[in-house]
Image (spheres, rainbow, N blue to C red):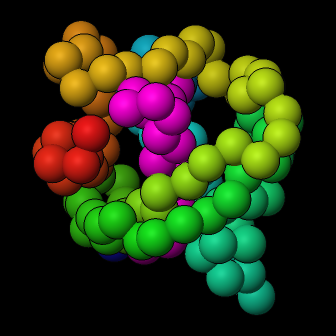
Amino acid sequence: MKEIKVVAAIIVKDGRLFATQRGYGDYKDWWEFPGGKIEPGETPEQALKREIKEELDTEISVGDHLITVEYDYPKFHMTMGCYLCSVVSGKLTLLEHEAAKWLGPDELESVKWLPSDIEVVEKIRGIL
């Protein structure tokens, strides 16, 4: 099975977290934490900063590692490193996603999360 390594930004502000809605692919309209693939030669932190700049035209500060999720999708195995992040500059402009929203602890179940992100949501419950 094909394996991919990705990173996700858990952007937290005022007790809420930033979620994005996919606009393409098999999981179009499902919700996720923004991020993407780690390119050869990049550290996870470098990849996350690059991906958020590309996807949201925003500079972030990458903080503590929150969780690593291993998940088997039908076509590939994914390892996703998730990091707590904060916005340094920019307005989280959607360049690739269909929609985005800030979710408080009581709103986490209001969106349809990607299967790999459900474990992350459960982990976040303990810190929001």
Relative to 19, 85 lies left or right: right
Instruction: Look at the magenta stretch and give its main secondary structure.
Output: strand
Residue 4 magenta: yes
Residue 38 magenta: no
Residue 99 makes an appearance in the image: yes
The residue closer to the viewer here, 99 or 86, is 86
Relative to 71, 64 lies left or right: right
User: Could you tell me residue 93's position as x and y percent?
Assistant: 78, 23
User: At 47% across and 20% down in the image, what residue appears?
Assistant: 102
Quadrant of the image containing the N terminus: bottom left
Does residue 18 lie above or below 64 as drawn?
above
User: At 84% across and 33% down in the image, what residue appears?
Assistant: 90
Relative to 58, 34 lies left or right: left
Quadrant of the image containing the C terminus: top left
Provide the residue span drawn in magenta.
Answer: 2-21
User: At 50% across and 16% down in the image, what residue appears?
Assistant: 101
User: At 30% across and 67% down in the image, what residue appears?
Assistant: 67
Residue 105, by quadrant, is top left
Residue 3, by quadrant, is bottom left
Q: Give the total of numbered labels.
A: 0
Residue 4 makes an appearance in the image: no
The residue closer to the viewer here, 2 or 58, is 58
Does residue 73 lie above or below 38 as drawn?
above
Does residue 84 lie above or below 105 as drawn?
below
User: Could you tell me residue 8's position as x and y percent?
Assistant: 50, 54
User: Could you tell me residue 104's position as x and y percent?
Assistant: 31, 21
User: Could you tell me residue 114's position as x and y percent?
Assistant: 31, 35
Q: Which residue extends farthest front?
A: 14
